[in-house]
Image (spheres, rainbow, N blue to C red):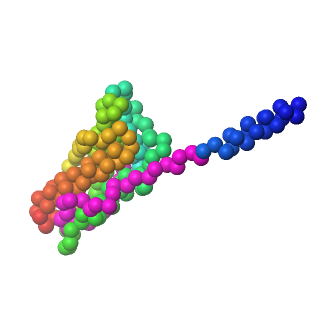
Amino acid sequence: MRPFCAMLLAATLSGCAAAPATPPRTFDLGIEPPSAPLPAVRVAAVRAVAPFDGIEMHYRLAWRNPAELAAFAQNRWAAPPAELFRKQLLRANGAGTAKCALEAELHEFSQVFAAPTTSEARLELHASLGGAKGVVATRAWRIAEANAGADAAGGAQALARAVNRAVGEIAAWAAARPECGG
C-alpha cells in the first residue's frame, strides 16, 4: 500500500510543478499619434455597444459562421475599445476654441477571418457633431483594414490602422462643417 500512496503523492505533486499558464497578452493602439489632426472640437463622449464595451479582443470566423462572435482566450485590450478610440481622438485634437462637441459610438471592433490564416480588422462607428444650436451633423463609417494576420497581435495592429483611418476621416468631416469653425 505504501508504494501506491507514494506514487499517488508523486503524481499529484508533479502536476503542481507543471509550467505555469501563459499570462494574457495585453494590447492597445500603439504609441504613434493619428496621422491627421482633428480640428478644434471637444471630444465629448465615446461609447461602444455590447459586447465591444469590455476588454475582450473579439473575432469572427466568417468562413464558418459570420454571426458568431468569440473572444481570444489569452489576449485582451488594455482598456475598452471606446476608451482606446477616445484616447486617439484626444491625441489628434487640434488647438483653438472648440465650437462643436464630438460624440462617437462603436458598433463593431473586431478581427474577421475569411479563412484560418486570412483576416481583416473591422471598425464600424457612428459620430455626431453638436454645436450651440444642437446636432450639426451625423455620419456613420465602416472601415475594413486588410492584412490583419492570423492572430490577435496582427488584429491589434490592423485595428490600430483602422482607428487611424477613422480619425482622419472624422477630421476631414468635422473640418468641412462651417458651424464648427471649418
Question: Please, is residue 129 above or below residue 158 in the view?
Answer: below
Q: Is residue 69 above or below residue 173?
A: above
Q: Is residue 167 left or right of residue 56?
A: left
Looking at the image, residue 4 lies above or below residue 171:
above
Q: Where residue 60 sits in the image (x, y, percent)?
A: 37, 35
Q: Classify residue 134 by image quadrant.
A: bottom left
Q: Residue at x 68, y 44 (%)?
A: 16
Expressed as whole percent of the image width and height from the top left, the position of residue 104 reads 29, 54
Q: Does 80 appear above or below 122?
A: below
Q: Nearer the viewer, residue 131 or 27?
A: 27
Q: Position of residue 2 (x, y in %)?
A: 88, 34
Q: Which residues are magenta?
A: 20-49
**Within the image, what quadrant is residue 41 found in?**
bottom left
Task: Decide if residue 101 is in sight here.
Answer: no
| The N terminus: image quadrant | top right
Q: Residue at x 15, y 55 (%)?
A: 173
Which SS does the magenta portion mostly show?
loop
Front residue (pair 32, 53): 32
Left or right, 175 with reference to 84 = left
Residue 32 lies in the magenta stretch = yes
At 14% from the left and 61% from the top, the residue drawn is 175
Picture mark count:
0
Tell which residue pokes out farthest to the front in this image. Answer: 3
